[in-house]
Each structure stands twice: as structure tokens, then as C-alpha cells.
Image (spheres, rainbow, N blue to C red):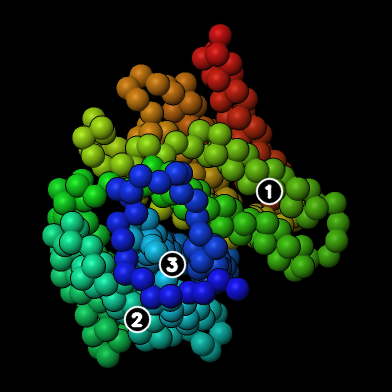
Amino acid sequence: MKLITVAPPRLRTLEDESERSATWLELFYDLAFVVAVASLVERLAHDVSATGVASFVGYFGLLWWLWASHTYYADRYDTDDLVYRLLAAAQMVAVVVLAASLSLDESASTTAFAIAYATSRILLIAMYWRAYRHVAETRDLVRGYLVGFGVAASLWAISAVVPESARFTLWAIALAVDLATPWVMRHEQARVPLDVSHLPERFGLFTILVLGESIAAVVVGLGHTSWGLSPTLAAAFGIGIATALWWLYFDNARGSVVRRDASVRKTWRPTVWIYTHFLLAAALAGFGAALELAVEEAGHDVVEAGHRWLLVGSIALAFAALGLIQLASSSDGEDRAIILARAIGIPLVLVVGLFTGLGSEWLVFGALGICVAELVSDMAASESEVV
């Protein structure tokens, strides 16, 4: 058995090491977010109104930022020692409580959410405090993080004891402070580059995590309806869309753009690449909820407007995000055909939502056809580059 000792954090991204991969702890850590995302998808499936969608986007944004913040820390400072493992495990407990607070039963509570979120941020600050003490070359950067994240964590803690009407306002301010902190510290960040192999892999893993909700949605949807041809077709077509979206993302994945240093000619590229992954993840999670509803409603003559537009809207948003990620990660003049295909796919898939007389299984089939066309277009573009 490996002996785990206490070791100070070290700056991993400036070390002369071979290409890094996600650690077993990072993969285990992601499991807590699988549960949290599943809770959010279930909430959205039960309420696809404008309020329900807005609530989903807001909570998903907070959840994604929580995951991303820990990922940034691990990218630079993860030494997998005893203290780090215990802090990460404590964060997992906070995320599990957060997931339970998002459920649809009596455990739902904005107070519990605020406490869990504040706890997770305080634990992240503890990680950065260790880095501040032991990694002298990044103290200027980490000092800014400690101040910004500390203010935001305090707001989260305060929000747990104020009336609910004011709670959401504090959440918005806290998130704004959190997001502004890396931007304010962008010059110091440029001196401490991100890992061009590890971070893209982590974002790719989160993308797969969210895509897994589509598979789970098929199981839930089939479990809520009697067996028949229509639900089975909707399920099969839905898995086809999930496969196509996976294909479109990973066949074009590039990671060198994440390094914010002198080698990056345009400084907007890393920011767009990173934060557009939130849009992609939210779209894929929304598609999971839409697919669950489509399977349940397969065979019915009428599909509710909200369910129909959630289906095509989530795919359209995924196309938009994929196009932006491609734009940010390609050099000037490259991948124009792929980016154009994504732009064309957005209105095409939205047109599918105009067919109000189609059953949900045929709506899914129409969307699948456009996804397949996107794949064919990518393959044709790749062949032309080879020639």
C-alpha cells in the first residue's frame, strides 16, 4: 500500500515533466458532480418554463464554477499529499450536500445550498493558503486569489442567514467577485501558465460527465413509460445525438490555447475557450433533460412547446459553443469550414422545433439528421485538408 505523507504544494506547470493526466483523485472527485448535475437535470425536466430554465442555468453556472475553480488549483499545485486529499474529500461532502439541496423533495433548501457552497469555497481558500505559504514564485497571484475568493466566500456565508429575498442578490454579487478575481489577476496568471495537456483533459472529462446524463435520461425516460416502438426509437435517436456531439467535440479538441503566455497571440482565445465550455456543458445537460421528456412523450400526437424548444434549443446552444471553442483554438484562417458548419447548424436545428405536428421521436430524429450532417461536413473538411 502506498504511504501518503504530508508534502507542501509545488508549482506543477513550470516543471520539466512528461505530459500529465488526470489523477485517480480527480476522477473520484468528479463523481460528486455527477450527482449534482443529475439533480439539476431532474429539476429542469420537471419545470421547463422560463423560470425553470433560468433557475437551471443559474445553479449550473455556480456548480460549474465550483468544479472549474478546483480544477485550476489542481492544475497548478496538486501534489496528491494527505492534506490535499482530505481537503478534496471535504469538498466532495459539501458538493453532495449541495446536490441534495437541489432535489425536488423536502431536502430542497437554499439555506443548505448557501452553507454547502460557502464551505466548498472556504476549503478552496485553505488549499490556496498552503500554496501561498510554500510556493514563493506565485505569491502575488495567490494573494489576489485569497482576497477575491475570500470576499466571495464571506458573502456566501452571510447569505445563509439573510432572508431568501436578499439571498439570491448576495449570490449574484459573490459570483461576480469570484469571476472578476481571475480577470483582475490576469497579468500574474500569464507568469504562471496552465498545463496544456492536463487542463484540456479535465474539461474533456467534464464534457463526458455531462454527456452521460443523456444516457441516464434514456434509462429514466424508458422507466417512466410502457415499452413500445416510439419510446425505443426516441431513445436510440437520442443516444445517436449524444454520440454525434461527443464526436464533434473530441475529434476537434485542442488544448494548447489554454496557456495564457507570450506564445498566445490573441489573449481572448484562452478566456473564450475556457468559459465557452460552461455553455457547452449547460447545453449538454439541458439536452439530457429534453431527451428524458422526449422518450416519455414518444408516440403522443402533441409535444409541449417548452419540451420541444428545450430539445432543439439545447442542441443549437451546443453547436454555438462548439463553434466558439473551435474559433478560439484554431489559428487564423484555419477550420473555417468547421466553424461555418456549426453556424449553419444552429438555425437548421431550430427549424425542427417549428414542426408542431411531429411526435417527439421524429423531432429527435430530425435533430439527429442535422448532427449527422455536421459530422459529414467535418469529415469532408478533414479530407480536403489532407489532399
Above or below, 138 relative to 354:
below
SS type, badge 1: helix
Q: Nearer the viewer, residue 45 or 96?
A: 96
Q: Which mark is residue 80?
A: 3
Which of the image's four quarters has the N terminus? bottom right
- x then y, percent, for residue 135: 23, 62
Above or below, 150 relative to 26:
below
Which of the image's four quarters has the C terminus? top right
Q: Which mark is residue 220?
A: none
Determine whether label 3 and label 2 are within 8 Å by CB.
no
Label 1 packing within 10 angstroms: few (<14), some (14-19), many (20+): many
Q: Nearer the viewer, residue 370 or 36?
A: 36
Q: Label 1 belongs to which residue?
A: 238
Q: Label 2 belongs to which residue?
A: 119
Tell me which label, 2 or 1, sits earlier in the chain.
2
Q: Nearer the viewer, residue 225 or 173?
A: 173
Q: Amino acid at mark 2?
A: Thr
